[in-house]
Image: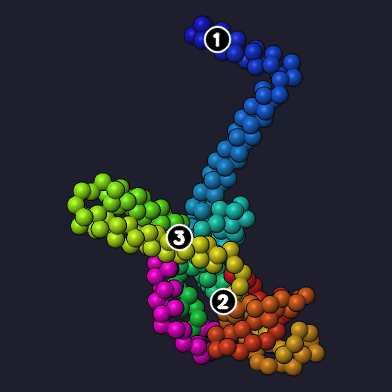
Amino acid sequence: MEEQYRDALKTITEIESGVKKGTKNAKKAVAIVVALMFAAGWSLTASAAGNELWQSAAEAYSNGDWQGALTQYQQIEQQGLVSDKLYYNIANAYYKNGELGESILYWEKALKLNPSNADAKFNLEIARESVLDRIEVVPEFILAKWVKDIKYLLSSNAWAWVALSLMLLVAVALLGFRYFRTLGLRRFAFILACVFFVLAISSFIFSLSERHDVVSESEGIVMLPVSSVKSSPGEDGKSLFILHEGTKVEILDELGSWLKVQISDGRQGWMPAGDVQAI
């Protein structure tokens, strides 16, 4: 132990000597180590605090204290520890608290992060039954619907891993094409390589598309009990129709404090930006 102590003391002395001499590399190394230690310590502290808040919020929710659970879930959100499960729980707390617009907003946010969250889908459909607006949906082209359904089978990260795995299979198939001796096997390996390559590109496109959907703010939820959609941005515009809390809109444009929106039946108009919360 004494010998190890002397070695450690010697090492520390050498580092201090290097710093005192103004060695740039030593200063950079110390700065990097300190920064990494600070980042790691902050991450562990934030994670531990988040776990405590999560458990406390779950306990409050199980005891029927919806507002208490909501407050603690929001503290987790403010720490940046967001996930589809967190948004799902926030939505549930809002719904239990009687806040329809906020609950629909957060279930939509949960599905934005994870479109395969079946619980969020189910609860969202129930909540939509309480929305006053009954808007006819324009039918989507069947092929586009199939592609969208396939895309949302997996998350963006999952599609990225699928793309990498398929590219690995492409490499294996090309090795087979290079080293197989018979013409039939080489042809089969080449066809497999082409198929895997097309699937890998498709998976990569799905991953990018889902990622774009997550960061995009092209959709929103009406948050006020009643909001008038006007023909032009401004209070002097003609009122075209009325939307109610919880209705989903597509955000087409923004001009000052007004948003140009479109609802699912194709009608368009302008709404105050404060009436809509982006998903």
State the image quarter where residue 68 is shown: bottom right
**Which residue is located at x 58 percent, y 81 percent?**
247
| Colour logic | rainbow
- Disc 2 to disc 1: CB gap under 8 Å: no
Q: How many marks?
A: 3
Q: Residue 204's mark? A: 3
Q: Is residue 193 above or below residue 128?
A: above
State the image quarter where residue 141 is shown: bottom left
Q: Give how far across and how far down residue 4 sits, in percent.
A: 51, 10
**In the rendered structure, which disc, 3 or 2, sits on the residue that comes first in sequence?**
2
**Which residue is located at x 49 percent, y 52 percent?**
55
Three-letter amino acid code of the residue under disc 3: Phe
Q: Is residue 138 above or below residue 16?
A: below
Q: Residue 100's mark? A: 2
Q: Could you tell me which secondary element the residue under label 2 belongs to?
A: helix
Three-letter amino acid code of the residue under disc 2: Leu
Q: Give how far across and how far down residue 259 sits, in percent.
A: 70, 78
The alpha-carbon separation of the residues under discs 3 and 2 comes to 36 Å
Q: Which residue is mark 1?
A: 7
- Disc 3 to disc 1: CB gap under 8 Å: no
Q: Quadrant of the C terminus?
A: bottom right
| Residue 169 is covered by the magenta coloring | no
Front residue (pair 213, 171): 171
Magenta part of the protein: which range? 130-156
**In the rendered structure, which disc, 2 or 1, sits on the residue that comes first in sequence?**
1
Q: Give how far across and how far down residue 59 sits, in percent.
A: 48, 57
The alpha-carbon separation of the residues under discs 3 and 1 comes to 52 Å
Q: Give how far across and how far down residue 146 sits, in percent.
A: 39, 76
Three-letter amino acid code of the residue under disc 1: Asp
| Front position among marks 2 and 1 | 1
